Amino acid sequence: MKQFGGFEDAQKAARYTGSAKLPSGAYVAKIMNVRYVAGENGNSDRIDIQFDIAEGDYKGFFKKQYDENTQEDKKWKGKSSVYVPKDDGSEKDNWTKNTFAKWTNALEDSNNKYKWDWDESKWKGLSIGLMFAETGNVIEGKECVYTEVRYPMSVEDTKKPDLKIPDIKKRNGYTGNKASAPTDNSFMTIPDGIEEEIPF
């Protein structure tokens, strides 16, 4: 058979299925980047964080998946947002304050000598425990299942043998009848020792 051009690229693309997902469970993660985003149209401000798995069998999970993705518009998917309270005294705001405090507590409990001082940029490089659980969603008319951060915890708490994994969260009319993995698992490479910002 005569060799045809572009085979190596085609072979690499064929190996990437985009279907791999992080199993539900508690993981130790490292925060790779932090960005404060001002809310618009009445929405709360938020702190966006990007992270990767730092220990265990899935260490470097998001980096590996990004490296294997050949799509031009790939994005880092190891991320979560921490919403900032509006301090307006509402019930929803009290819930937001509680959630925000869970993040700062988890960071303080996971990093020696770290104390929350109202400077979110210091989160970069810190360790944190994250509980991942399944979410069922309907995206562009197709049902899919993926794992996402459900809540933060201390690194020490991720080691507990009796951790309960939250039940699947259903969104946008998800029924579970035609579940399949999402096709857009895209990530970004972070070489060891490089301190450059990760594009959000």
Image (cartoon, rainbow, N blue to C red):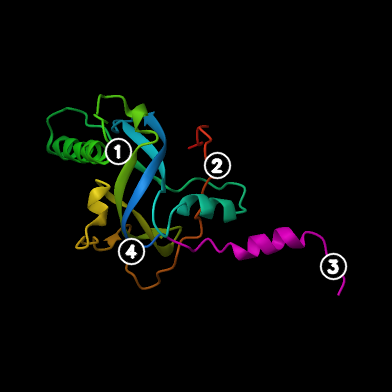
Q: Which residue is mark 2?
A: 191
In the drawing, what numbered circle is on residue 3? 3
The reply to whether discs 2 and 1 touch (Cβ–Cβ < 8 Å) is: no
Location of residue 175 with respect to 163 vertically, above or below: below
For discs 3 and 2, the disc positioned in front in the rendered view: 2
Q: Earlier in the sequence, mark 4 or mark 1?
A: 1
Dot 1: element: strand
In percent of width and height, residue 200 lies at 48, 37
Front residue of 132 and 40: 132
Front residue of 69 and 58: 58
Dot 3: element: loop
Front residue of 157 and 176: 157
Residue at position x 47%, y 51% in the image: 62
**Disc 4 crowd, CA 10 A, few/some/many (<14, 14-19, 20+):** many
Residue at position x 53%, y 35% in the image: 194
Distance CA(mark 3)–CA(mark 2): 34 Å
Q: Earlier in the sequence, mark 4 or mark 3?
A: 3
For discs 2 and 1, the disc positioned in front in the rendered view: 2
